[in-house]
Image: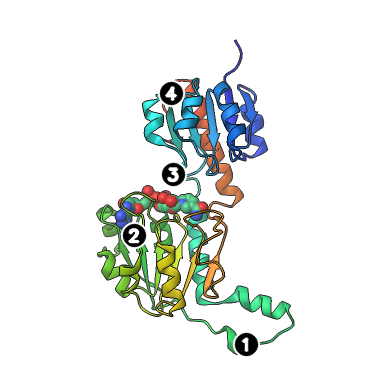
Amino acid sequence: MSPPVVLVSDPLPGVLLAELATDFDVRRCDGTDRSELLAAVPGAEALIVRSATRVDQEVLKAASRLRIVARAGVGLDNIDVGAAGRAGVLVANSPDSNVVSVAELAVGLIVALARPFADASSSVHAGEWRRADFQGVELAGRTAGIVGFGRVGQLVATRLGAFGMRIVAHDPFAREELERAGVPGLGLNEVMRRSDVLTLHVPLTDGTRDLIGDPELALARPTLHLVNTARGGIVDETALARALREGRIAGAAVDVFADEPPRDSPLIGLPNVIATPHIGAGTPQAQERAGRDAVRAVRQAFAAVPPAGAGAL
Ligand code: NAD
């Protein structure tokens, strides 16, 4: 009997591909090339993706032999989970793989907004010595508002607490976690009013789309630094750009955009915006953990055992 076909349509560490190849017929394609993807999926019994491959109804319809889509990462917004369920295709993700990497990036961006070392470094490399132009602020004693007190939000809270920041949070679904951490859970408007730093850690859903828009930003302090390492679409980029241009908030750091790459985002080019290209999970530790969970999910799907460790939906 020929081994099951596993199609890998986003990058996966070579060591994991080699490991899979011992029991599966591993095929590669570029999931961002739609025609290549649609040509490859009909033969696939398992599909491993990261965030670049869009697994929608069209792909699922073409993939008539598919048993499982394994997402080597956390977010599932590139997969039509409902359509997969209707087609009898299991969807597995790796919810814990990159939470530390994302939390560390968020904290790094918070520090980078407080102390403009990237611009200061470019200036020194350019032969300048403009100490007065690169003044910052201390984080200690300031208030950090955490929106979404899940896995990443909790790690960020612990790390910002170590800086001596006061922590408040908004997450109506995490009462127990907030109580355990001793963090006051407040309404979003109250968090907006109190925060010097606002960091977002909610998934993108119908309930969180444009969660931070004109009405929320109107409540913000002029000192506010806003950090989005969660998903584009949670912040209304037009409203955020307006608030930044008009000096109603002080700065923003954005790792995720409504459209990626962000060709038309009004945030691009603003001097008080740090923009990074969706690098939250961009560490070898996170990539390997996510890849291992995806491989394990595929193996277990073919062993007819529910995935352990990887989140099965
Ligand atoms: P999680 O599911 O553990 O936590 C999400 C939290 O958001 C939950 O506690 C939930 O109750 C809360 N929430 C949901 N809707 C809310 C609302 N309307 N208001 C307030 N809180 C709400 O998820 P996580 O592992 O902490 O990850 C958070 C997000 O980070 C992910 O959904 C993903 O979008 C993003 N992420 C980004 C990258 C990156 O590369 N930048 C990588 C991984 C994850």
Image x and y of residue 93, in percent = 46, 38
Q: Earlier in the sequence, mark 4 or mark 1?
A: 1
Q: Earlier in the sequence, mark 4 or mark 3?
A: 3
Nearest-to-viewer mark from 2 and 1: 2
What residue type is disc 4 on? Val
Disc 2 to disc 4: CB gap under 8 Å: no
Q: Is residue 161 visible?
A: no
Query: Residue at coordinates 34% horizontally, 68% vertically from top-left?
Result: 214
What residue type is disc 3 on? Asp
Disc 1 to disc 3: CB gap under 8 Å: no
Nearest-to-viewer mark from 1 and 3: 3
Disc 4 to disc 1: CB gap under 8 Å: no
Position of 203 relative to 309 (above/below): below
Q: Which residue is under mark 3?
A: 77
Q: Is residue 128 visible?
A: yes
Q: Which residue is under mark 1?
A: 131
Determine the CA span between mark 2 and mark 1.
38 Å
Image x and y of residue 125, in percent = 72, 77
Task: Compare residues 88 and 270 and report the one nearer the observer.
Answer: 270
Q: Which residue is under mark 2?
A: 211
Give the side of residue 155 with respect to residue 122, left or right: left
Image x and y of residue 94, in percent = 47, 41
Q: Earlier in the sequence, mark 2 or mark 1?
A: 1
Alpha-carbon neighbours of circle 1 within 10 Å: few (<14), some, or many (≥20)?
few
